[in-house]
Amino acid sequence: MTTTGEVPTEAAPEQRDALVGRLFEAAIATMDVFCVYVGDRLGLYAGLADLGRATSAELAERTGTNERYVREWLEQQVATGILEVEGTAAEATARRYALPGAYHEVFLDRSSLNCLAPLLRLTVGVTKPLPALLQAFRTDGGVPYPDYGVDTLEGIAEMNRPMFLNQLGTEWLPAIPDVHARLLADPPARVADVGCGTGWSSIAMARAYPKAEVHGFDLDEASIALARRNAMAEGLTDRVTFAVRDAADPDLAGGYELATAFETIHDMAKPVEALRAMRGLVKESGAVIVADEKVGEAFSAPGDDVERLNYGFSVLHCLPVGLAERPSAGTGTVMRPPILRRYAAEAGFSGVEVLPIEHDFWRFYRLNP
Ligand SMILES: C[S@@+](CC[C@H](N)C(=O)[O-])C[C@H]1O[C@@H](n2cnc3c(N)ncnc32)[C@H](O)[C@@H]1O
């Protein structure tokens, strides 16, 4: 083993205790994440919001769940400071519980940027194939995207949907004046939405630009099936279509005015091939826009919250997904700007511009032909 510096070996009780405290808090916080997941998936928060103040039996009846389990969950939620209780000293079955009004948006308003339930659902979802992940570490394998199941797929969908519906057509694309103008103009513009997942970005673009036609592509069959249902429910099937396609397929073609890739390039085994395909998808005058994680320009220690969150998702999900197909670039969630610039150059783009779009978690790039 080679080392470039001395690693301190002396006992440092304060440093040790700080880590012990931090990890203990993290274990409690993890319990919160999983218990919120239970409440979200079983409709317990929604049931409480409907009932106002409810006993465990009333909530169980309302949600078709078992009273004893519900009572334990309610007590956990009070103990951790999320729910309110009336009659702490009363018989356990007589206590009445409530969801504070300020929290309704956080758990229940699926259109709000403050709705955190989907992020927690995704966090639980990425732990589903843990045995396969350990095996992948040991054997140089990967974990295919479908193995993460419905919580990951729908967690991503629900997490990104409010951003797409609230910001994509009203802030992000209007911040790129030539693209915005073209999407509004005649003849109707055509958009290719690569790695579209469950289709909310495609739907948001079609909603914001009533003339535009949007074609979403994704490799995941379950995502495309849901995207089609979403477009149907939105009444947009005349202008929004979806297909199961590999973004790296060199046969992708179409003379589009715009090609987009939202939070997907870092998941792809062949990002260079996918960017090359996007270059081929657009007309000479067309634009290629990529949005991906707003991680730092370079690795640094310690990382900020965005880096910590994205490294977590990378270890547990995005890297093993990317490595499930071989050969693979093995990018992971932490795709820093220099990495994207290299991929873009290898795909034949002349340069990459970081767009002046403010966002806490994503950075927006325009890839120049
Ligand atoms: C994190 S999800 C993002 C989905 C969607 N763009 C959104 O923002 O909600 C990444 C998506 O990339 C898709 N993907 C990964 N590799 C792909 C490929 N080679 N071709 C097409 N889609 C791919 C996955 O199936 C998944 O739906």
Image (spheres, rainbow, N blue to C red):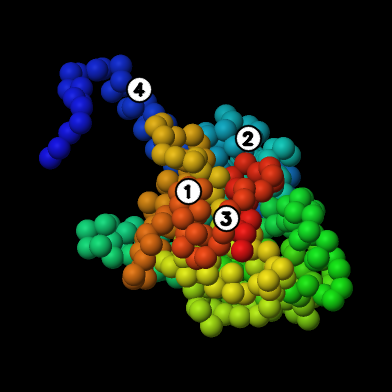
| Residue 25 visible in the current orientation | yes
Q: Quadrant of residue 303?
A: top left
Q: Counting residues from the N terminus, which is met first, the one under dot 3 or under dot 4?
A: 4
Taking 205 as reference, is 23 above or below it?
A: above
Q: Name the residue that disc number 3 marks.
A: 351
User: Quadrant of the rendered structure where residue 100 is?
Assistant: top right
Image quadrant containing the C terminus: bottom right
Q: What is the spatial separation of the Cα atoms under label 4 and label 2, in whole angstroms?
A: 33 Å
Residue depicted at 30% across the width and 16% down the height: 14
Name the residue nearer the viewer: 165 or 272.
272
Q: Secondary structure at mark 3?
A: strand
Report how far apart the C-alphas of labels 3 and 4 lie in the structure: 45 Å
Residue under pointer 1: 338
- Marks 4 and 1, the one that precedes in the sequence: 4
Of mark 2 and mark 3, the one earlier in the sequence is 2
Q: Amino acid at mark 4?
A: Ala
Q: Amino acid at mark 3?
A: Gly
Question: What's the CA distance linking mark 2 and mark 3?
Answer: 58 Å
Dot 3: within a 10 Å radius of its alpha carbon, few (fewer than 14), some, or many (20 or more) residues? few
Amino acid found under the numbered disc labelled 2: Val
Q: Is residue 114 visible?
A: no
| Secondary structure category for the residue under label 4 | helix
Q: Which residue is mark 2?
A: 85
Q: In terms of secondary structure, where does tag 2 sit? A: strand
Residue 84 — which label?
A: none
Residue situated furthest right in the rendering? 186
